[in-house]
Amino acid sequence: MGQPLSARLRPMNESTYRQQPVSFVRRGSRLQGRRQKAWEEHSERYLLEVPRLVADTSVHPDYRFDAAKVFGRSAELVVEVGSGLGEAIVHAASTQPDRDFLAVEVYLPGLAQTIQRAAAQELSNLRVVQANAPEVLSSMIPAGSISEVWTFFPDPWPKSKHEKRRLVTVSFAELVATSLAPGGLWRLATDWEHYAEQMLEVGSNSSLRNVHPDWAPRFEGRVITSFENKAQLAGREIHDLTFQKELPTK
């Protein structure tokens, strides 16, 4: 047998790692009750174990995700960035069995909850990964291989001094554009007005095309999650956006 993957990866310079602030803060990582049970019984099936670089949410840049090998077939791939408790992506995987889904999340209880939901329905077309999304899109997933990227209700970082930590930036938009297949879609949603305006500006000035004049109608494939329900009860308006990677001209 050959060397394990970790032994074949080239050493990296840790001093240049994550020079920009990440868009998340690590919350509690304790698992209890059903989540702990789901993790123990089903993480081997649903969790992608990826080689790390420095942090436990990093992805070594030499690692490549082989969707056909992981899922055992060739199908459209949908990636949700910040999948939370898995409500949206598990519903989508259960109603679209012809597509494969990858949930990207850093919050361990959220990953466990997603695994619990997926296992309850015995889904075979869903996997989860605990990783920093820009690293997933920049190196882990081959360019041009994603059908849709979903970014629903990312942390708004509402204080002006924290806006630099927002996920949706010009650089992130270009990572999404590179990862999408021609004709692929980037779907976004937020309940924060200022962040919605930023998303619209970022996407409109990227290499992607806004599918609508400005805001998109609500994406019917997105179920109303507990988070979105709280936003609605608080009176915050939900904004949807859809950007597309253009097909090559003939």
Image (spheres, helix red, strand yellow):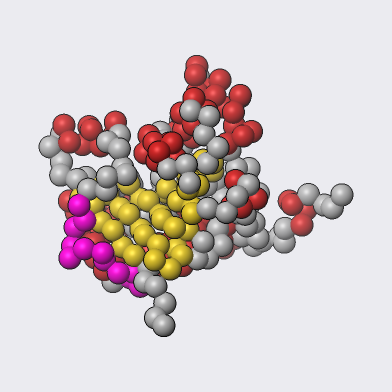
- Count of marks overlaid on the render: 0
Q: Is residue 73 above or below residue 231?
A: below
Q: Nearer the viewer, residue 157 or 241?
A: 241
Magenta span: predominant SS is loop
Name the residue at the bottom extreme: 250
Q: Would you identify the image quadrant in which residue 174 lies? A: bottom left
> In x, y percent, where is residue 233?
16, 31
Q: Residue at x 37, y 54 (%)?
A: 167
Name the residue at the right extreme: 1
Q: Is residue 151 above or below residue 203?
A: above
Q: Residue at x 39, y 73 (%)?
A: 247
Q: Would you identify the image quadrant in which residue 14 lies? A: bottom right
> In x, y percent, where is residue 59?
59, 52
Q: Relative to 86, is 211 on the left or the right?
A: left
Q: Residue at x 34, y 69 (%)?
A: 208
| Res 212 seen here | yes
Is residue 66 in the magenta section?
no
Q: Is residue 193 above or below residue 244?
A: above
Name the residue at the top extreme: 33
Q: Quadrant of the C terminus?
A: bottom left
> In x, y percent, where is residue 107?
46, 37
Q: Relative to 215, is 51 on the left or the right?
A: right
| Res 166 seen here | no
Q: Nearer the viewer, residue 111 or 20?
A: 111
Residue numbers of the magenta segment: 206-217
Q: Is residue 77 above or below residue 206?
A: above
Q: Residue at x 41, y 55 (%)?
A: 148
Q: Nearer the viewer, residue 70 or 160?
A: 70
> In x, y percent, where is residue 199?
27, 59
